[in-house]
Amino acid sequence: MSDDDYQHDLADLLNDPQIAALIGARENLHSAATAMMENAPPGDALARIGSSELPTALSAMQAAEESGFLDEIEDAARWVARTVTVTPTELLADRPGVDAFAFLGAVILVRGALAQLDEAKAMNE
């Protein structure tokens, strides 16, 4: 296969709507996960936000972000999303501060990005 053939095949692949949806979903997940990590509150505030696994899940998310491996980012994001147990209403009653709300908002974005990724994966099966 020549370089021209390879470039043409790659362009065709990237123009495929199903592949484009998958790439977009991965990009959205990465952006949401980055925002989540940027807004993660200090360890003492985590107990009010999620389960006892949340600090470990956040450490895994940080390691996954540093590695850049998409599957690791996805797995860690799913773990963090599962371990955050507080609802916005419960958080409001606790009055933890702006950082905790920013973090919860980012977790909600991660959950949405994961749902989008699941839909894109289903389209490509």
Image (cartoon, rainbow, N blue to C red):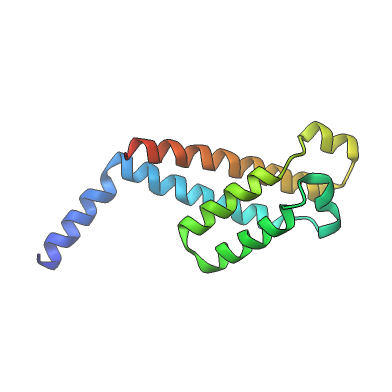
Q: Is residue 71 above or below residue 87?
A: below
Q: Is residue 77 above or below residue 108?
A: below
State the image coordinates of residue 82 (x, y, percent, origin top left).
65, 43
Q: Residue at x 47, y 56 (%)?
A: 71
Give the residue furthest to the front: 52
Give the residue furthest to the top: 89
Quadrant in which residue 86 is drawn: top right
Task: Please give the count of numbered marks on the rendered protein.
Answer: 0
Residue closer to the observer: 120 or 97? 120
State the image coordinates of residue 84 (x, y, percent, origin top left).
71, 44
- Image quarter in which the N terminus is found: bottom left
Q: Residue at x 52, y 68 (%)?
A: 67
Q: Is residue 11 above or below residue 101?
A: below
Residue closer to the observer: 48 or 3? 48
Residue closer to the observer: 124 or 18? 124
Quadrant in which residue 59 is drawn: bottom right
- Left or right position of 86 against 5: right
State the image coordinates of residue 96 (x, y, percent, origin top left).
88, 46
- Image quarter in which the C terminus is found: top left
